[in-house]
Amino acid sequence: TPTAPTPAYKIGAQDNDPVKMYLADICTVTVNIASLPGISTTCGYTADGLPIGMSVIGRRFDEQTILQCADAFEQTFAPTAPKL
């Protein structure tokens, strides 16, 4: 499924605000309803070292193309994870 519109949460972080929780999933809803294949790959890191994801969405039943696209991105740009 697509990536959330925010960086990853810190381990153990919880947010009980239902609106924030809904908005964290806002990018996944329409893609899942449309039954489109999607993949998320790391495209960078925040100043705190948390991963930032990039979504690649494809045509229905065309998983091979999105896998190739994500692989090409990772091979070309391969962001280095910071030491935690």
Image: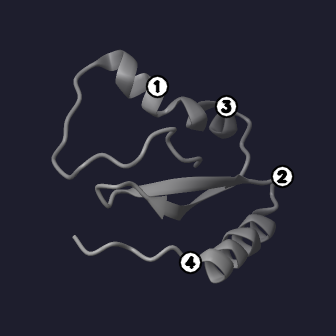
Where disc 4 sits, the SS reads loop
User: In the image, is residue 53 above or below residue 72?
Assistant: above
Percent coordinates x, y for residue 27 in the rendering: 59, 35
Q: Which mark is residue 59?
A: 2
Q: Mark 2: which amino acid?
A: Arg
Element assignment for label 2: loop
The vertical placement of 38 against 79, above or below, is above
> What residue type is disc 4 on?
Ala
Is label 2 or label 4 in front?
4
Which residue is denoted by mark 4 in the rendering? 78
Q: Is residue 12 left or right of residue 39?
A: left
23 and 31: which is toward the camera: 23
Residue 80, picture quadrant:
bottom left
Mark 1 surroundings: few (<14), some (14-19) or many (≥20) residues within 10 A: few
Q: Residue 14, how many percent across, how many down?
A: 20, 35
Type of the residue with mark 1: Leu
**21 lies left or right of 16:** right
Residue identifier under label 3: 30
Q: Are marks 2 and 4 in contact (CB under 8 Å)?
A: no
Q: Earlier in the sequence, mark 3 or mark 1?
A: 1
Q: Position of residue 51 (x, y in %)?
A: 41, 59
Residue under circle 1?
Answer: 23
Please tell me which residue lies in front, 35 or 67.
67
